[in-house]
Image: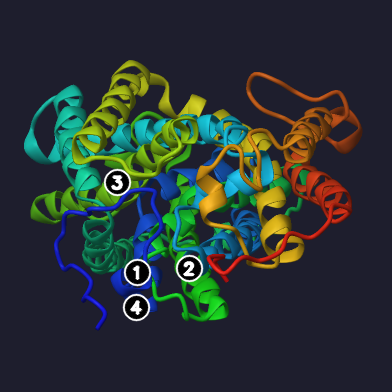
Amino acid sequence: MQAKPSSSLIEKRAIDFIPENERHGRLLSQFTLWFSANLQITAVITGALAVVLGGEVFWSLIGLLIGQLLGGAVMALHGAQGPRLGLPQMISSRVQFGVQGATIPLALVCVLYVGFNSTGTILSGQAIAQLAGVSRQTGILIFSAVIAVFAVCGYRMIHLLGRVASVFGLVAFAYLFARLLSVNDIAPLLRNHRFAWDTFLLAVSLSASWQIAFGPYVADYSRYLPGATSPLRTFLCVGGGSVLGAQIAMTLGVFAAALVGKSFAGREVAYIVGLGGDGAMAGLLFFSIAFGKITVSTLNAYGSFMCLATIISGFKRQARIGQVQRLILVLAIVGLSTWIALAAQADFLRYFKSFILFLLTFFTPWSAINLVDYYWINKERYDLPALSDPDGAYGRWNKVGIGCYAFGLLAQLPFIDTGFYSGPLLPYLSQVDVSWLVGLAAPGALYFLLARKRAPRAAPACAAK
């Protein structure tokens, strides 16, 4: 007889393989998790940037939707790997980069999620400060403490948060949209159809980067599903929840920024809540904003912990991470994010745009290589023991994967446009940043050509399939 999966909210496993007798959950939880992770204030700010940086409402909404669909498809393809492999997302990078070579993308992923956690902590700190009548610094510290507790609890707690937060978020955003439409005339905003390639593609890039940035940890939250779960249904639930939640939130941000104007920067949370009224209702909205950030901030802290644990295990030849180690790593990650949030809160909006666009430089090549290898080279079959053995089938450092990744980074440089670097080809492209498209196509194609020339690996009996 197979043992029943534990119902404890405290997760016992970390980056080790999840055996079939411990698998549990339904696909609906994938939809609610990613719906709630996107239906939150940082996504609102991301949508607002499309207008703050010069876009018109009509084409910004269309550009954001196109980016959601493109980026959402990429992240959902990663999510479909979880039930098949029973492993966290980034440990599968050892197939493409080597057991120790995977440290390269893993370290960059840690930076990614610490950065995202910092921005989320700033916005949640604003909401808690308004709700509790405390300083922003105190609000940031309160929020960080809550995130640390939930991240230590792990997988079940995160999915429970997703289900609750999806209900809170849906009610709050429905109310905000109703208020926005009742007190503002948005028809003039939608009638302006002036099109500009630069601002349109900026909107596409903002939402595509938002979705692709989930890729390095999306399978972490589907790895407990039964191995027989349909990859197509997993893809649709993960991608559908993520795209729908993000588009709703970013649409609100577009309208808010268009109505408020330049004064939006610096008081983003207060203006969003101001759309809904004052008094008790404002208090409820502040609570909803803070609560909505708990899910995605816990994802970021938990994902960072998984990446650090994977780095450590790559050099120690084992995948077990004890509870004490788990606590120490989570506290270190949350502590660093909190320190950055306290230091950077005054210049949030200015740094945030450059940060999220520059992320594409590092994660689109990794995503392309990982997906090409999983779906077209190894065809969903990995040797699980070899993932923890530097002397095994995948080696310590995979020169092909690392070389293709470096090529992807370099190929994007002429096309990048951020606040601190602009590529030399941008003047010939009307300052339109298309680096993320290059970052997906170039390294993915090169990896396919080089990796398929190697003799196909025999699929051992213990392979995930």
Specify which label sits upstream in the sequence, 2 or 4: 4
For the residue labelled by badge 2, is the local secondary structure a helix, a strand or a loop?
A: helix
Numbered circle sitting on residue 238: 2
User: Which label lies toward us, 2 or 4?
Assistant: 4
Disc 1 to disc 4, C-alpha distance:
11 Å
Numbered circle sitting on residue 32: 1
Q: From what the image shows, is residue 448 above or below residue 55?
A: below
Question: Identity of the amino acid at label 4?
Answer: Arg
For the residue labelled by badge 3, is the local secondary structure a helix, a strand or a loop?
A: helix
Question: Identity of the amino acid at label 3?
Answer: Thr
Residue 449: % across, % down: 89, 52
Question: Identity of the amino acid at label 1?
Answer: Thr
Disc 1 to disc 2, C-alpha distance:
9 Å
Q: Residue at x 66, y 27 (%)?
A: 418
Numbered circle sitting on residue 26: 4
Specify which label sits upstream in the sequence, 3 or 1: 1
| Left or right for 158, reference 459 | left
Per the image, the residue denoted by label 3 is 298
User: Which label lies toward us, 3 or 4?
Assistant: 4
10 Å crowding of disc 1: few (<14), some (14-19), many (20+): many
Check if mark 3's residue and mark 1's residue have beta carbons within 8 Å. no
For the residue labelled by badge 4, is the local secondary structure a helix, a strand or a loop?
A: loop
Q: Residue at x 23, y 71 (%)?
A: 5
What colour scheme has been applied to the protein in the rendered image?
Answer: rainbow
Q: Nearer the viewer, residue 237 or 39?
A: 237
